[in-house]
Amino acid sequence: MRKIIHIDMDCFFAAVEVRDNPELKGKPVAVGGSPEERGVISAANYEARKFGVRSALSSAMALRKCPELILIFPNMQKYIEVSQEVQAIFHKFTGIVEPLSLDEAYLDVTESTFFQGSASLLAAEIRKQIFETTGLTASAGIAPNKFLAKVASDWKKPNGQYVVTPDMIDSFVINLPIEKISGVGKVTAEKMHKLSIHTCGDLQKLSLEDLRNHFGTFGYSLHEICRGIDHRKVITYRERKSLSIERTFNTDLPTTETCL
Ligand SMILES: [Mg+2]
């Protein structure tokens, strides 16, 4: 049985900005692009989330939902530096670290001997060191695989952690919404809802054959993931297969020619 920790910084970009400007504390703060130039929100603190301000929301809409929102332009260099400090803490405890973004990573601590092998105590120590080093809070999920660890890190957010032990897996997944499964986007979720599938428990009622008929090759992993089974390894190095860059234009480009 493996021991995987998923660490997720709380409202990362926004938290860095509040840390560096204490006057912002307790106020709704978001990091994002300019509302006049179709900017979008990349992070919002909990005060802002109360108003419905979420990442990927347009900055203009965010300001409509929360007129007193303090909107800060992203300072990526600073976030990268903080992220490197956090990564250095992970590497004190294990070499098997898979960063998912600047503020999230999987750690495989199966072979770790820290804290007599207790992954929970180790996660608590990592979060403590993150706070001491950066002044920021992180949440953690501890579980026998990546899927469960990632879902669990959301459970006690912010500044908390949640453990899914092997004997808890069945009860943990049974009522879990299918939207929590990575790879289930809006389209697949709608398709499942039409089939009256809302939770992993509902998915479990379908045979592997049914799942393959409805969802193609994804059916194989769905059959396992809905039972809390996930054999994906924590990958420390990945060859880049593609690169994408987004650019939002200030005004609409009405023709294919202008887009090209
Ligand atoms: Mg985060």
Image: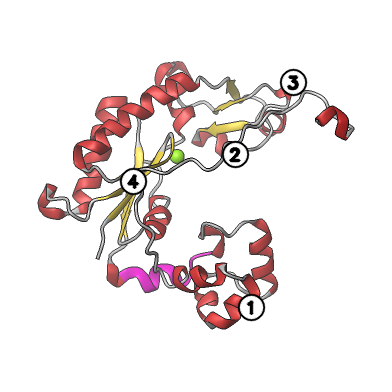
Q: In the depicted view, which residue is nearer to us: 59 or 99?
A: 99
**Are the residues at dot 3 and dot 4 in contact (C-beta closer than 8 Å)?**
no
Residue at numbered disc 2: 54
Q: Nearer the viewer, mark 4 or mark 1?
A: 1
Q: Quadrant of the N terminus?
A: bottom left
| Above or below 116: residue 192 | below
Q: Position of residue 239 (x, y in %)?
A: 44, 42
User: Disc 1 marks which amino acid?
Assistant: Asn
Q: Tell me the number on the disc at residue 36.
A: 3
User: Disc 3 marks which amino acid?
Assistant: Glu
Q: CA distance from mark 1 to mark 2?
A: 35 Å
Q: Quadrant of the C terminus?
A: top right
Q: Earlier in the sequence, mark 1 or mark 2?
A: 2
> Which of the 4 quarters of the picture holds residue 192?
bottom right
Q: Which residues are magenta?
A: 168-177
For label 1, count other residues whose C-alpha is less than 10 Å away and answer few (under 14), some (14-19) or many (20+): few
User: Judging from the image, what secondary structure is the residue with disc 1 in?
Assistant: helix
Disc 3 CB within 8 Å of nearest ligand 1 atom: no
Q: Earlier in the sequence, mark 3 or mark 2?
A: 3
Residue at numbered disc 1: 213
| Above or below 120: residue 258 | above
For label 4, count other residues whose C-alpha is less than 10 Å away and answer few (under 14), some (14-19) or many (20+): some
Q: Nearer the viewer, mark 1 or mark 2?
A: 1
Count of marks overlaid on the render: 4
**Residue in the image at 13% along x and 47% along y:** 114
Q: Is residue 241 left or right of residue 82?
A: right
Q: In the depicted view, which residue is nearer to us: 54 or 78?
A: 78
